[in-house]
Amino acid sequence: MDLYAEIVRLRKAGQKCAVATIVQVNGSIPSYESAKMLIREDGSIMGTIGGGCVEADVWTAAREVIETEKPRHLTFSLGQDAAYDNGLICGGQLDIFVEPVTPEPRAYIFGGGHVSKSISKIANMAGFATVIVDDREAFANKERFPEADETFADEYENVFPKLNVTSSAYLVIVTRGHRDDMRVLRWAVGTPARYIAMIGSKRKTISVVKELVKEGIAREAFEKIYAPMGLEIGAETPEEIAISVVAEMIATRRSPKSDWRQLSKSIFAHEELKALLK
């Protein structure tokens, strides 16, 4: 299989990978400049940059690159002794660039109302593919959401198994009522989504979380919830709310995992919820 075709396949499947490329060579090495190796999330590889311990070290670095989504530049000196120890038949120096390849971020928007329309448009402009889910056909269709990749008009529980939610997914819960928000959140907290947000006041958030905790959902499951959703910019109109939400999604997307909570007001910013979830 062609390496570039495999990258396209992985991105469409919502999977991350890393590509290691020999970018500079001095002396003799067991490969060639521009040689590439692809490392998948599961650790499997495609292609080679020469084998030996160099390739093993690059594999280890690539796993870190996949996790952090930050590139690395590696330099190896293959003197005669090192070359012999590594099972290589030549010495030299090579520089390798390891870059992350991430899927197109996908925003799953639950609810097809006015706020959802604005979120879908702005998220699409910011580079997110959007998917609309509503249990009413009049609110989830291509005419209402022409920029969306997909629309689903069915009961939420019927749609959930059809959604390919990965660590590159963003779930935005904006349904028409408290009951439906709870239905979606109950499912959402069990997914690997990078971002889960729910519209509503602090009081509503506390009420929904209390009910789900009573059902037996693990308290840790709520750590990744952003509610009320969006950065605090005083948003009031659907367009302003959409800007605040997409800005929060961008902050989450562009920040290392360790910094997600610092850049956005998560559910754990509420003292009442901290006490509830202890």
Image: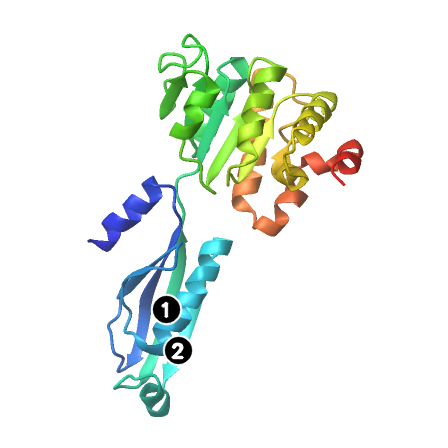
Instruction: Measuring from the top left, give residue 251's x and y in whole percent.
Output: 57, 40
Name the amino acid, label 1.
Ile
Q: Is residue 71 visible?
A: no
274 shown above or below 132: below
Q: Earlier in the sequence, mark 1 or mark 2?
A: 2
Mark 1, residues whose alpha carbon is within 10 Å: few (<14), some, or many (≥20)? many
Q: Are marks 1 and 2 in contact (CB under 8 Å)?
A: yes
- Residue at 54% over, 31% down: 188
Q: Is 57 on the left or on the right of 216, as rendered? A: left
Q: Secondary structure at mark 1?
A: strand
Judging depth in this view, the residue of 95 and 31 nearest the camera is 31
Name the amino acid, label 2.
Phe
Judging depth in this view, the residue of 182 and 67 nearest the camera is 182
> Which residue bears the numbered disc 1?
96
- Residue at 44% over, 38% down: 105
Quadrant assignment, res 8: top left
Mark 2, residues whose alpha carbon is within 10 Å: few (<14), some, or many (≥20)? some
27 shown above or below 35: below
> Which residue bears the numbered disc 2?
76
79 shown above or below 186: below
- Residue at 37% over, 77% down: 53
Query: Residue placed farthest to the bottom in the image?
Result: 81
Instruction: Measuring from the top left, give residue 198's x and y in whole percent.
Output: 60, 26
Quarter of the picture containing the C terminus is top right
Q: Is 5 on the left or on the right of 189, as rendered? A: left
Instruction: Measuring from the top left, give residue 124's x and y in whole percent.
Output: 43, 28
Quadrant assignment, res 41: bottom left
Quadrant assignment, res 13: top left
Judging depth in this view, the residue of 7 and 23 nearest the camera is 7
Judging depth in this view, the residue of 133 and 90 nearest the camera is 133
